[in-house]
């Protein structure tokens, strides 16, 4: 009889810092970026592609064709992108030699989205790149233009038969996917005239964040948390996405969007779905997305008359932040001085299913908050008997219940708060925490969300992209709030820049006996 012996790794080797980690195979392809001179392209797309190239995580047989109205040559586009990539590369060095090779893969086609010739120019460039860079006829279109141009651009791609070819054709569509439910449906219909569902990649970059993906690993790769993950043990869930920045020159767009549309309808609803969905039976794109969609469909749609009870809008006013005078939203460039835009939104959702019935989920997001932090706090119920309540001068104080915090950014990690006996005689308890920190555990640079999502789209894996049913379900849950707010005359501004939002938001939680946690 043979006996197996478990040999432990020597202690100096950290098994989490494994250089042979799994990477998916990415086929050759060309990427056409519409809106290539825009902010997203400069700040996220090109730096991510450069980084993927640098790390050899994409095929060397690739080419990028940027297109927008600005008149530029290939060379000028390369120079412009060099500036942006070196400036916006997050936590990564810029290498001149690698850039020189990468730049040979960049091309530019000036053009207007509604001019048919532009598409013919793109076709010729694609043919050229297919020959010179052996991209095998595979093409990924990336729509990062003004959202009002999405449908038009897609229809033109169809008219010019760019939706088919000798390789695969896929299209990534940036958020926002629609301005409301009706426009999201309409946009979907238009896209389906040209591309079938398997070719459509609706991007929500929050789903590509490592820490958001890790929620699934944490929940379904471990046996000990899931039994507690329900209404019997969880008292409430708080999802916070606070930004210290203002609207950063995007006043025009933001004024029309507002915080609820900009963050909750998409990113934070998807985060909520990831935290609260049922386990998929198989980890594949259909099953994972089915479960996310099911969760979103179970969110109770608030009645118009209840909106003031379950949703709070805020807008920042001018203030001194860290010794610096900061303008109010209405004083930002391109913003109407009477704008009724929400730069802060907080909502209470209830999930009407067996697992979560009655457990409130509080979501808040805002610009010009005291700091940049995105996290999810799962607040557990107190133990049934308060054995260790503390006596204070003002009476008995409840001990603080267990709290599990999933830190999405920054300081990515997970911490669990529990009570411990304070050293010394007597039974005094105080909260302590057990912490997992991505940086120190894995010790390697975390890929950005756009890197992950671009690789997935090239590899043909839509698991981290949203599906139309998910998009529609999340519009359905925010729409009554948006409609009610559109008819409300708010007394804005109602929170000074650099603070945690309006008082009404605290009152919303207080009505349920809860308080916002300070992240
Ligand atoms: C974008 C919003 O989708 O997400 C921005 O339009 C917001 O307003 C941004 O600032 C936040 O993303 P991140 O990755 O910085 O948290």
Image: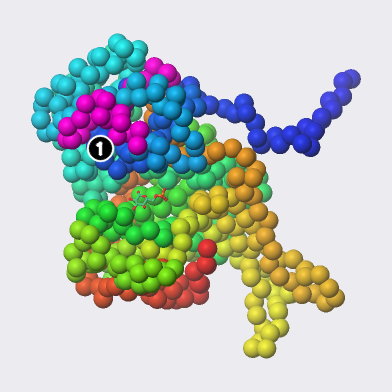
**As rendered, which of 208 and 135 lies closer to the eye?**
135
Answer above or below: position of 172 versus 57: below
Q: Residues in magenta?
A: 59-83
Q: Is residue 122 left or right of residue 473?
A: left
**Extreme top residue here?**
131
**As rendered, which of 480 and 45 lies closer to the eye?**
45
Q: Give percent across and percent down for residue 481.
A: 29, 63
Q: Is residue 334 visible?
A: yes
- What count of labels does the image hold? 1
**Extreme right residue here?**
1
Q: Give percent across and percent down for residue 154.
A: 20, 32
Answer above or below: position of 102 versus 422: above
Answer above or below: position of 386 versus 103: below
Residue visible at 26% across and 41% down in the picture: 38
Q: Which image quadrant for residue 168?
A: top left
Q: Give percent across and percent down for residue 8.
A: 80, 33
Q: Which residue is mark 1?
A: 37
Q: Give percent across and percent down for residue 265.
A: 34, 53
Q: Is residue 195 visible?
A: no
Residue visible at 25% across and 25% down in the picture: 74
Q: Which image quadrant for residue 404?
A: bottom right
Residue visible at 71% across and 66% down in the picture: 419
Q: Is residue 357 left or right of residue 145?
A: right
346 in the magenta segment:
no
**SS for dot 1:** loop
**As rendered, which of 167 and 130 lies closer to the eye?**
130
Residue visible at 65% across and 80% down in the picture: 397
On whether ligand 1 comes within 8 Å of the CB at mark 1, the answer is: no
Quadrant where the image shows the N terminus: top right
């Amino acid at each position: 009889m043979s006996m197996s012996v478990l040999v432990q790794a020597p202690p100096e080797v950290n098994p989490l810092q494994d250089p042979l980690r799994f990477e998916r195979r990415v086929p050759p392809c060309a990427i056409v970026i519409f809106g290539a001179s825009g902010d997203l392209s400069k700040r996220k797309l090109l730096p991510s592609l450069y980084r993927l190239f640098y790390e050899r995580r994409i095929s060397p047989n690739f080419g990028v064709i940027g297109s927008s109205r600005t008149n530029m040559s290939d060379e000028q586009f390369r120079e412009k992108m060099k500036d942006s990539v070196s400036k916006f590369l997050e936590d990564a060095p810029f290498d001149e030699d690698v850039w020189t090779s990468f730049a040979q893969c960049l091309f530019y086609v000036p053009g207007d989205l509604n001019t048919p010739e532009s598409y013919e120019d793109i076709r010729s460039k694609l043919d050229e790149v297919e020959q010179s860079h052996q991209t095998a006829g595979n093409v990924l279109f990336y729509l990062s233009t003004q959202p009002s141009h999405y449908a038009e651009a897609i229809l033109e791609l169809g008219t010019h038969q760019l939706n088919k070819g000798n390789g695969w054709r896929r299209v990534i569509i940036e958020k926002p996917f629609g301005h409301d439910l009706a426009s999201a449906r309409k946009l979907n219909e238009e896209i389906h005239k040209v591309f079938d569902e398997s070719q459509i990649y609706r991007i929500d970059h929050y789903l590509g964040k490592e820490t958001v993906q890790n929620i699934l690993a944490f929940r379904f790769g471990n046996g000990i948390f899931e039994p507690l993950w329900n209404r019997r043990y969880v008292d409430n869930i708080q999802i916070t996405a606070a930004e210290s920045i203002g609207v950063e020159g995007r006043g025009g767009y933001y004024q029309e969007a507002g915080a609820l549309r900009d963050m909750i309808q998409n990113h934070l609803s998807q985060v909520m779905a990831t935290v609260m969905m049922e386990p998929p039976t198989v980890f594949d794109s259909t099953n994972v997305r089915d479960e996310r969609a099911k969760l979103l469909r179970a969110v109770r749609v608030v009645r118009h008359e209840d909106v003031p009870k379950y949703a709070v809008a805020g807008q920042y006013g001018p203030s001194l932040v860290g010794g610096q005078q900061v303008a109010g939203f209405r004083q930002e460039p391109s913003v109407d001085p009477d704008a009724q835009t929400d730069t802060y939104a907080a909502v209470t959702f209830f999930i009407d299913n067996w697992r979560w019935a009655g457990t409130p989920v509080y979501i808040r997001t805002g610009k010009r908050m005291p700091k940049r932090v995105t996290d999810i706090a799962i607040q557990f119920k107190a133990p049934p008997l308060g054995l260790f309540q503390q006596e204070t001068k003002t009476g008995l104080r409840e001990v603080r219940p267990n709290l599990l915090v999933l830190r999405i950014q920054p300081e990515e990690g997970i911490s669990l708060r529990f009570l411990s006996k304070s050293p010394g005689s007597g039974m005094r308890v105080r909260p302590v925490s057990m912490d997992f920190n991505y940086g120190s555990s894995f010790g390697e640079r975390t890929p950005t969300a756009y890197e992950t999502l671009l690789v997935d789209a090239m590899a043909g894996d839509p698991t981290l992209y949203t599906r139309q049913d998910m998009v529609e379900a999340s519009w359905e849950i925010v729409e009554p709030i948006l409609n009610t707010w559109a008819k409300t005359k708010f007394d804005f501004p109602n929170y000074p820049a650099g603070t945690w939002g309006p008082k009404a938001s605290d009152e919303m939680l207080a009505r349920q006996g809860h308080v916002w946690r300070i992240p």
